[in-house]
Amino acid sequence: MQQPASPHASPTDLHGLTRDELRALITSWDFSPVHAARLWNYLYYEAAGALDSDAMPDIPARLMERLQAETALTIPPVAHEARSTDGFTRKYLLSLADGKKIETVLMRFTGRVTACISSQAGCAMGCVFCATGQMGFSRHLAASEIVAQALHVRRILKAQGERLRNVVLMGMGEPLHNYDAVMRACEIMRDGSGLALGARRITLSTVGVVPGIMRMANEASPIHLAVSLHAATQAERRKLVPAAKRWPLDQLIDACRYYAEKLNRRIFFEWTLIDGKNDTEDHAHAVGRLLTGIHAQVNLIPLNPTAAYDGAPGHTSAAKKFQAVLAAYNLPSTIRQRRGIDIAAGCGQLAAMS
């Protein structure tokens, strides 16, 4: 039988446990696994906002006492909420237990609602046009803090009779810099008895952390991979993405080819269109040549404004010409719908500020 936790031990965060781990914890306390199943249901299907008998009435009092003494829930309070005039986007500034703050975005599209969640407080990658990169790195998020963001959106939607359908790890931070916590969070979010997000409804976006891409391939990670490319030559990419110095473009493309071939899966390549810098037809031809032979799709994203970068978004006409060139290389592409620009909730704009 597991001994009671030391009064000085950190409580076990229930949102950081898989269903099997939660079951093992409850049964180690000599309670029936039935109670573990009920607790899991409260945590994820009901998205309970507290660890008490009011929020979880079917949990026996003796078990609730043990849970309150030795465990905790990550339910970060909202420090600030902003609603876009586009009518589709809300941004939440969430406060963590240590005072750090992160941003989470709820985005509505036709037929689905997507949560854009963060994996770190700040980011160490330093992409020049990204507000998170401009603020620097603070710390990794725990798996429970990543899951808690999806649950925050789930509670909002549940109150409106809606369901969370998609999650994108495209908020603050570099997910593959926090690999283990991110993958644990994805496992928890994918559980069919909980949030039940299918693997193909979760997309992870990386600036190009080669070891992480290789690890995803070798571990057959089932979630979607998106790679922030932004330039088709090493010299141009280094100017935009400092991480390219550590993981050069040729190494990144080799890793992407390995991933796509090993898993027989498409990769999404993200291309931020910056007026006059990377949005010409010549740039599009360079992308076509670079990605030839990779099962890929290119997502074109007009630059969103940030305080420390003076570039301008590529024009719609340039984006359409870019698309036409990519089509000649049999590369499908989309032009990303802009959401929440007026509240700094768009791609590259998150910076933990109200």
Image (cartoon, rainbow, N blue to C red):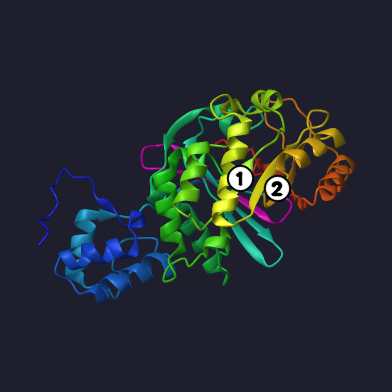
Q: Position of residue 12 (x, y in %)?
A: 26, 52
Residue 244 visible at all: yes
Residue 322 figure quarter: top right
- Number of other residues with Cα within 10 Å of mark 1, as a class: few under 14, some 14 to 19, many 20 or more: many
Based on the picture, tell me whether residue 97 belongs to the magenta stretch.
Answer: yes
- Number of other residues with Cα within 10 Å of mark 2, as a class: few under 14, some 14 to 19, many 20 or more: some
Where is the N terminus found, in terms of image quarters? Answer: bottom left
Horizontal side of residue 167 vs 74, given as left or right: right
Q: Secondary structure at mark 1?
A: helix
Depth check: 82 or 208 in front? 208
Q: Secondary structure at mark 2?
A: loop
At 50% across and 29% down in the image, what residue appears?
A: 124
Residue 105 visible at all: no
Q: Position of residue 102 (x, y in %)?
A: 50, 41
Tell me: residue 13, above or below residue 246.
below
Based on the picture, tell me whether residue 314 belongs to the magenta stretch.
Answer: no
Q: Disc 2 marks which residue?
A: 293
Instruction: Point out the tag, 1 or 2, that comes first from the N-terminus.
Output: 1
Looking at the picture, which amino acid does disc 2 mark? Gly
Distance Cα–Cα, label 1 vs label 2: 8 Å
The answer to whether the residues at label 1 and label 2 have Cβ atoms under 8 Å apart is yes
Q: Position of residue 328 (x, y in %)?
A: 85, 48
Horizontal side of residue 176 vs 203, given as left or right: left
Depth check: 8 or 216 in front? 216
Looking at the picture, which amino acid does disc 1 mark? Arg
Tell me: residue 182, above or below residue 231.
below
At 48% across and 67% down in the image, what residue appears?
A: 196
Q: Disc 1 marks which residue?
A: 257
Tell me: residue 156, above or below residue 289.
below
- Range of the magenta residues? 85-102
Q: Position of residue 146 (x, y in %)?
A: 44, 49
